[in-house]
Image: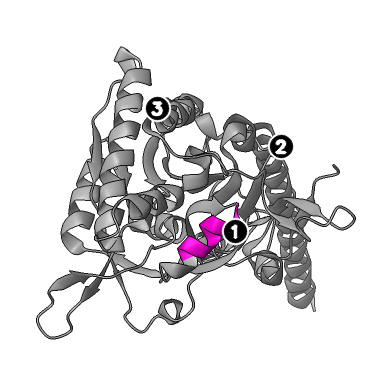
Amino acid sequence: RSQSNSTTSTRDECDLKSSSMNTTGRTLIKRKCLVSRIWTRLGRGKMFASNSRGGDFQRRDRIVVAIGGNALQERGKKLNICRQKENVAAAVSLLKPLLEMHKVTIVHGNGPQVGYLALMDKQSPLDILDAESQGMIGYLLEQEIINYLSDEKKRGTATVLSQIVVDPDDPAFDHPTKFVGPQYRTEEETQNAVNSGHVLKRDGPFLRRVVPSPKPKQLIEHQLIALKHLVENDCIVVCAGGGGVPVLRDPTCGHLTGVEAVIDKDLSAAMIATEIEAKGVLILTDVRGVAIHYGDVNKEKWIKSVSPDVLATLMDHFMPGSMRPKVEAAITFTAEQPFNFCPHFDEPSWCKIGALKDCGRIISGKSGTTVTTLYGTNHIVYYNH
């Protein structure tokens, strides 16, 4: 009986210690997570000097910046080189803090530019014009980056002419959605476009040419090797311009051939970001963010932050060839990231969408839409205004 009482007493003592340890452990976890969330709130949005693993606010993340063709060319205005240079210079000046603080890869759109090239050169197929636009915009971006970066922040800069493999059976070839070229504002312009065999769809109040926009499958291996080498050596890279030149791979011999289409640059940006293991994707366009009931003054609501799971349920609100591919890119890049109860120790990847002119405010979380699993899978917050 004495031995039994002793055993019972020891067991009770162990249970008490175990309970005490569990309570202490839970308290420590709660405190650690509380500190984590406070730290995250203090640092949230300050991605120019973000930190997810400690107190070093100078950590340099890999970030892919996708700049829309409409952001580089004001919607509705005619394209000319002087205006294009001014727009590129303005874009790079807004990106300067990001370029200096992080390892940035730039993907740009080419919708307006390739459309104008097609009006001037009616003989060349779209894949050739895609390549021309990559060289033109890449040159302008590189030149302004070199002009804007201070001597102490000087780094290698390069444009990679990018060929991206697409699927010949992609349904996009039968249902063109990608806007290219100018808006047709008169009946004469519209009729001339129709007579040229172009497919037109409404872009805002006016009609505009649309072309096939197949999904990107992969950057060809030789260029991916070059891209990774440049990124690992801290170079600012311009790549997959206009979404990349769309090519088909012969299943028998592996040879590549161009195809008439324009790949969406946002989907290519998400693909590139995954390939180079980027921390975030910043999609800059000419609208303030992602909205539901867009254009309806009574119902329109702008999204501040949202999980990819919730965003996927709202796809009917986003127009193909416009906001939808941006949303698809954001979901694709962030959806695989698991929710972590203590995000301070392992912050998930993110995607931010907003207007180029608001770049600084988007980074600080005061504007645009942030897509992330940071706050769980069933998360959405709207702006109050």
Q: Give the residue pinned by disc 1.
A: 187
Front label number (2 vs 3): 3
Residue at the spot 45% in from the left edge and 76% down from the top edge: 172
Q: Which mark is residue 53?
A: none
Extreme residue in the front direction: 188
Label 3 environment density (alpha carbons within 10 Å; few <14, some 14–19, many ≥20): few
Would residue 53 appear left or right of 82 to someone viewing this image?
right
> Disc 1 vs disc 2: which is toward the camera?
1
Q: Main secondary structure of the magenta part?
A: helix
Question: Which residue is more in the foreground, 355 or 175?
Answer: 175
Q: Is residue 237 visible?
A: no
Q: 237 left or right of 223?
A: right
Precedes in sequence: disc 2 or disc 3: 2
Q: Residue furthest left?
A: 253
Gap in Å between the C-alphas at discs 1 and 2? Answer: 58 Å
Q: Which residue in the structure is indicated by mark 3?
A: 82
User: Taking 138 as reference, is 149 above or below it?
Assistant: above
Q: Which quarter of the figure has residue 265? A: bottom left
Residue 258 versus residue 1 in the image, above or below: above
Q: Amino acid at mark 1?
A: Glu
Q: Quadrant of residue 328?
A: bottom right
Q: Which residues are magenta?
A: 186-193
**Residue 38's mark?**
2
Mark 1 is surrounded, within 10 Å at the Cα level, by few (under 14), some (14 to 19) or many (20 or more) other residues, namely few
Q: Position of residue 315 (x, y in %)?
A: 66, 70
Q: Decide: is 95 above or below 241.
A: above
Count residues near mark 2 (Cα–Cα under 10 Å), then give few for <14, some for 14-19, many for 20+.
Answer: few
Residue 129, image x and y in percent?
28, 55
The amino acid at mark 3 is Cys
Q: Judging from the image, what secondary structure is the residue with disc 1 in?
A: helix
Q: As rendered, which of 135 and 1 lies closer to the eye?
A: 135
Instruction: Determine the image quadrant of residue 169.
Output: bottom left
